Every structure is written in structure tokens, then in C-alpha cells.
Image (cartoon, grey):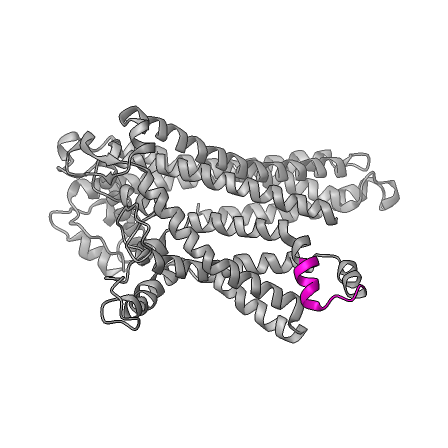
Amino acid sequence: MSLLLTVNLVLALCVIGYILGTRRALGSADGDQRLLHSLKGYYGQNVALSVLVPSAILLAIWLIAQPLLINQSVAGLIAEQDIAEGASSSLIIQDMRRVADGLDVVVHEGVLADAEIAALNADTTNVRDLLGDVGVAVGSEITQQTLDGARHYRTLAQTGNLWRGFAVLAVALAGFVFALQRTHKDFRARNVVERGVLVLLFSAASVAVLTTVGIVLSLIFNTINFFDAFPAADFFFGTRWEPSFSGRGGASDLGFLPLIWGTLYISIISLIVAVPLGLFSAIYLSEYASDRVRAVAKPMLEILAGIPTIVYGLFALLTVGPLLVSAFGSGGLFGVNWMSGGTAAITAGSVMGIMLIPFVSSLSDDIINAVPQAMRDGSYGLGATQSETIRQVILPAALPGIVGAILLATSRAIGETMIVVLGAGAAASLSLNPFEAMTTVTAKIVSQLTGDGEFNSPETMVAFALGMTLFVITLCLNVFALYIVRKYREQYD
């Protein structure tokens, strides 16, 4: 039974349950709604929730467990000698699963029947071309072992899907009958429904919280494993970043300081660009711009926040970098030779600053607009001009919120990766020269986890230590920003 059919049947049962639950409640009160404990809709909702919630929980558990159990069963068909050097059983299982999906398409398209699939022989039939004819591309050759595994996988999946449909429908039907039997004019349907909605809301909040806890715990455990293999002092106080994936092992230098320096340096350059432009934009939009200009300019400014960071990275690589070289490079506009290549800290910082403008301007604009009008009127009443009112009344009143906006933009800058990879280069450096290539913590996390080293080596596990350190830094910045914003809100609420 397909997943779509199962879901549709459950939803249909919910609708039927809602209608019958409402009618049954009214029937028990002889059609007089005043005799019902709750509004009639609550009785229908109770039946619908009794059908939907347990069946949805069972379906979710089944969808997670079934692939794991099938993979475990298929893995038992793979002998150690069948795994080629450089391959793994998981890759073989993926091939089997891909072929099994392709065989489903072959049957669905009517090319072969199930009996013919069972009789297929990889030595006499080119299964790869067969799948290619129905639009399923398989990269490697399909051996008899892969074909046998795919057929086994397909059989288990079909059986599992069939039983999944029966089990989910059985649970839904049991909830339907149970809830319908309880439906009576004296039944406290509203209390049950509201309690059920409360549980759903709590579950949604718990998923977010538990996900955060899981992420933090995974970082902590892997960071501890890294520090078991690499000295913490060399990591936190080392000034050289020279990891080696060529088997030198402990000979790698994994000093954290060049990376955090590059992160902070590029972030500072971006804030030098973003803070004045964003703040001036916010002041103009909130205090000087007409309603017509504001209605057009603010959404256009906020479009910058929706551009993917890879696009900003390409802009830095192809446009801003060459432009800066033509100005500060050899034979450039200013007659200096400060910049030898387009990838530099100033390139990434400038483009990142442009990206951060809406983060500063939009939030600052909202904060400035939240300053009570009575403060402006009081200033004007004392004879102050508009610029004096902005400088001496509005900005001091909005300062805590503006500082919070800047700190949030700083957190965003510290975590940026794509612009740094394409615009700043990959050199871990402690230089003060903004025209030299630098790199950041996030860029190195990507490069360490996409290398060809073993996953349990210090050169790979250092990515988790870098991530944990960056997480602590950004968490502190966000807590500080939220503290300031909350203080501001308490002042004017």
C-alpha cells in the first residue's frame, strides 16, 4: 500500500469522524445544542484527532525504522570478500536500493512484469541499459549480487509498505471507534481537544529544543575526542595552522589563533562597511523619507538579505576583487602595489558588509520608529531642529536597540562562509594587512571535513573543536544582544 494512499485514507477517516462525531453528539441531546457540554465542533474534532494523532505517530516511527531494518537485512547478503578495496557495504546497499527503485519504475512502466523481474539474470541481461531505457541512470555496472540484493530489498520494501498501510489504518480505525463510542452530550470534548492541542504545541516546541540539545551534545562529544588526541594548549595558543592529510598525523600544526584572527578581522571590515551605511539608511527612511519613498526603498533594501551568499561570493570573486586590484595593485589607479591578487580580507569584508546592510538598517529602522512621538514633540517644542532632535534625542533613546542590531549583524558576519571562501582565499594568517589573503574558522571547518583524511584523525576532528569555539563566541554575542534589546523594550513598553 503506497504512502499517499495510506495518508489519504487516514485523512478521509478524519473527515468522516468529524461529521459522525458532531452528529452523534447532537443526536444524544435530541438536537438541542444547549444540552451539550461543549460546542458541537469539539466532538467532531475529538474524533478527528483520535484518528489522526496515533496513526501519524505510528507512521512516522515506521518511516524511520523500516529503511534501517531493510538495510540491516540486505547487509547480511554482502560477504566481506565482496567489498572491493576503497568501497564499503553502505555504498553497495545504496546501489542495491537505487536498482530496486529502478525495477519499480520498470514494472510501473509496463516494460517487465514482476515474474520477469524475478527471472532476470545479470549475466545475460544488461540491467543497466534496461533501467536507462526507463530514465533511471545507474553509474556502475550491475552485477548479479547487486541484482539479487535489489530484488531482496524490493521484496522487503513492498512487504513493509503493505504492513505499514494495514497497521496505520488499524490504529486510525481503533481511534475512530474509541472516540465515537465516548461521544455523548455529557462528554467533556472541549477539555480533551484543548489538552490534545496543548500536547501538540508542546511537542513542536520540544522538537526544536531537543534538536538544539542534540547539536550541542554532538559538538561537545566530538570536541572531547579531539582534545584526547591533540593538546588543548597547542590548539588555543598555537600561531600556525598547517594541517596535514598525508599521514604526518601528530606533526600537524592546528593553532586556533590565525583562524580566529582572520574571522574577527574580516568581520570588523564588514562592520565598517555595514554599520554606517545601514544606520544612515535607517535614519533617512524613518525620519526624512516620505511615505511613498519609504514604501519603495525599504523593501528594495531588504532584498539584499534574500540574496544567497554564494551569489555574494561570486560577486566578490569576479567583480569586487578585480576592481580593488585595478585600484590598489601594480599599475593601478592609485599607483601603489599593495594588492597582488583579488582574494583578500578587504574583498570579502567589503562584500560581506554589503550583505549585512539590511540586518542593521531594517532592525534600526524599526527601533527608531518605536521611539515615542512624544519625545520628538517635546524636542521640537523646546526649539530644536530635526537634525538636533535626531542627534540628541532619538539616537540616544534608540541606542540600546541599535547596539543589539549591530551585535546580531556581528554574529552573522562571524558565521559567514561562502563569501570568505571565494573572496578572501584560504591562507591562515596573523597579518594586519587587509590586502592579503586570509581565512576564517567556518571556511576551515568546511575544508577539514571535506578532505580525504580519516574521520577520527585530529586533522578532521579539529573541525568540531573549531565549531564548538565559534558556537560559544556567537552564543555570547547573541545573549548580549538580546539582553540589550530586552532592556530597550522594557523601557518603552
Quarter of the figure that contains the N terminus = top left
| Residue 275 position within the rendered picture, expressed as x and y whole percent measured from the top left | 51, 58
Question: In this picture, is 319 found above or below 61?
Answer: below
Q: Which residues are the magenta region?
A: 382-394
Foreground residue, 427 or 169?
Answer: 427
- Residue for point 85% across, 43% down: 30
- Residue for point 61% across, 40% down: 51
Question: In this picture, is 306 found above or below 101?
Answer: below
Q: Quadrant of residue 450?
A: top left
- Residue 394 appears in view: yes
| Residue 186 position within the rendered picture, expressed as x and y whole percent measured from the top left | 82, 34
- Residue for point 23% across, 41% down: 91
Relative placement, left or right, of 402 versus 59 is right
Asked if the stretch drawn in magenta spans residue 354, the answer is no
Q: Is the magenta stretch mostly helix, strand or loop?
A: helix
Foreground residue, 207 or 336?
Answer: 336
Asked if the stretch drawn in magenta spans residue 386, the answer is yes
Question: In this picture, is 195 found above or below 325?
Answer: above
Foreground residue, 305 or 45?
Answer: 305
| Residue 72 position within the rendered picture, expressed as x and y whole percent measured from the top left | 31, 32
Count of marks placed on residues: 0
| Residue 28 position within the rendered picture, expressed as x and y whole percent measured from the top left | 81, 39
- Residue 163 appears in view: no
Relative placement, left or right, of 157 versus 277 is left
Among all residues in the image, which is located at the extreme top? 228
